[in-house]
């Protein structure tokens, strides 16, 4: 049964706790303090304070007379007598042969070990994405403790002031988009690679994009990217060689949206285009029937690589009212994105001035585009700590709330009963906390009236 549901189980975050008694709130506070410590240490090292630790003001005026006195050397030639008396040993021929044989054997062993190490070496991009933990929620507990007044429902205590929401998070494959230095024209020469989240392997061959060189983006490759050419940008680690992973979450998202909006419109993919008849891909056409209804031809274009880098919306207003009325409904909705898709045009439609000099029409002129609305299904809601920086690997500073029910595993019980998704539980807990705040506000008002 587990092997059958393997593709469905990958949505379950691989969170492993060394101590189950430590709550997610405590681990989050510890991770945040560790980030602050590393940030302060990095700032101090950039100031190079250690290089000034051994500096002094020099000798005082009282020591000036001592510097004029000549230095007397008390050593004689007796120390060199032992060096002259020691005989020089000449190595024998047999020892040379034995040493050379050992050197050859050790060299062979080192080459074999080196080949083994090269094969076992992992990619430097492996596990570089900030992977969110599943938000630990407890709907059965009371909304607040009667003695201490602390909220024990699992929601963050500073949810309304210290978090940023990302919704709707599209369904797809998590990856890193990395650009390299290219000698050709940006947008035409291949300069971008996609790396998988866990192993850092290449998902696609290098392809051109309008991204600047030396840029690293945390992305989600759309499940239907071959039909719409969309790759969703979740976060930014580096832009044009500038490291922004140490910045706080709101700034990183603002930087992401601002820089992506400045990029030129991506050109059409060069080379041979692939048009596939709609009846040949029945499964894909059933998923994107509405998005491809505006296409004038009966054949559907297949993108060889993603061309549209679309940022995922983020929301800095995480008050309970905003979550209930805007963020949570958006996490359940389907996002509509307008994309340009090439359509196949018959060569007979071209006039004489559109022909090349050699009498054959250019392949670029034989393509035109049409605007199509792509419908992207939501996979859930992400929460980020506002004053946290980007952290590699699984981190409690980011929490994942899927909008679909989680398939339980024996070693990782989900804690959600029935067919309710974690987003359903999150919505009910937000409503309960809203009612609790209203009751607390009325109690304070009554005490003031008394």
Image (tube, rainbow, N blue to C red):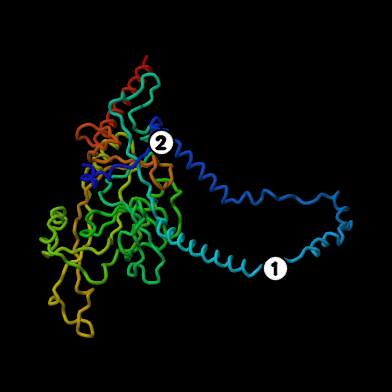
Q: Given this view, does label 2 or label 1 mark the residue nearer the observer?
A: 1
Q: Quarter of the image containing the C terminus?
A: top left
310, 445: nearer the viewer: 310
Q: What residue does disc 2 label?
A: 18
- State whether residue 90 is above or below residue 238: below
Outermost bottom residue: 358
Relative to 20, 53 lies left or right? right
- State whether residue 37 is above or below residue 106: above
| Residue 35, horizontal then vertical, whole percent | 47, 42
| Residue 403, horizontal then vertical, whole percent | 24, 40
Residue 71 visible in the snapshot:
no
Residue 410 visible in the snapshot:
yes
Residue drawn at the location 43% of the way across and 43% of the way down: 388
Q: Earlier in the sequence, mark 2 or mark 1?
A: 2
Outermost top residue: 450
Relative to 137, 213 lies left or right? right
Residue drawn at the location 39% of the way across and 57% of the way down: 216
Residue drawn at the location 25% of the way across and 64% of the way down: 304
132, 1: nearer the viewer: 1
Relative to 64, 304 lies left or right? left
| Residue 429, horizontal then vertical, whole percent | 28, 30
Using the rendered view, name the quadrant where residue 132 is placed: top left
Element type at marker 1?
loop
Q: Quarter of the image containing the N terminus?
A: top left
Q: Which mark is residue 315?
A: none
Element type at marker 2?
loop
Q: What residue does disc 1 label?
A: 90
């Amino acid at each position: 049964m587990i092997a059958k549901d393997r593709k469905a189980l990958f949505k379950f975050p691989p969170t492993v706790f060394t101590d189950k008694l430590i709550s997610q709130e405590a681990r989050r506070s510890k991770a945040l303090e560790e980030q602050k410590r590393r940030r302060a240490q990095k700032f101090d090292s950039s100031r190079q304070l250690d290089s000034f630790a051994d500096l002094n003001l020099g000798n005082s005026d009282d020591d000036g007379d001592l510097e004029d006195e000549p230095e007397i050397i008390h050593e004689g030639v007796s120390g060199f007598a032992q060096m002259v008396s020691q005989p020089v040993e000449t190595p024998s021929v047999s020892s040379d042969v034995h040493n050379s044989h050992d050197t050859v054997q050790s060299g062979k062993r080192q080459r074999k070990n080196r080949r083994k190490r090269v094969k076992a070496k992992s990619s430097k991009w492996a596990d570089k994405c900030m992977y969110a933990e599943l938000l630990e929620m407890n709907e059965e507990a009371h909304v607040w403790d009667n003695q201490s007044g602390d909220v024990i429902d699992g929601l963050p205590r500073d949810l309304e002031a210290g978090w940023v929401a990302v919704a709707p998070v599209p369904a797809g494959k998590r990856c890193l988009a990395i650009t390299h230095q290219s000698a050709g024209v940006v947008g035409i020469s291949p300069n971008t690679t996609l790396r998988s989240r866990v192993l850092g392997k290449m998902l696609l061959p290098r392809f051109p994009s309008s991204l600047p060189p030396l840029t690293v983006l945390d992305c989600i490759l759309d499940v239907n990217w071959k039909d719409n050419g969309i790759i969703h940008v979740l976060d930014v680690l580096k832009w044009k060689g500038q490291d922004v992973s140490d910045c706080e979450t709101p700034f990183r998202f603002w930087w992401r949206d601002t820089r992506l909006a400045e990029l030129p419109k991506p050109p059409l993919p060069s080379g041979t285009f692939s048009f596939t008849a709609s009846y040949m891909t029945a499964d894909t056409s059933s998923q994107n029937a509405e998005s491809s209804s505006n296409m004038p031809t009966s054949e559907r274009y297949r993108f060889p690589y993603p061309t549209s880098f679309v940022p995922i919306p983020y929301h800095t207003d995480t008050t309970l009212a905003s979550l209930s009325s805007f963020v949570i409904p958006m996490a359940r909705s389907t996002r509509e994105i307008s994309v340009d898709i090439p359509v196949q045009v018959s060569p007979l439609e071209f006039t004489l001035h559109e022909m090349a000099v050699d009498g054959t029409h250019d392949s670029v002129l034989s393509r035109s585009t049409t605007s199509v609305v792509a419908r992207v299904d939501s996979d859930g809601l992400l929460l980020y700590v506002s004053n946290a920086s980007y952290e590699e690997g699984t981190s409690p500073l980011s929490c994942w709330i899927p909008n679909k029910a989680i398939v339980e595993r024996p070693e990782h019980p989900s804690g959600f009963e029935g067919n309710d998704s974690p987003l359903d539980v999150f919505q009910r807990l937000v409503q309960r906390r809203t009612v609790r705040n209203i009751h607390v506000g009325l109690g304070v008002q009554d005490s003031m009236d008394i």
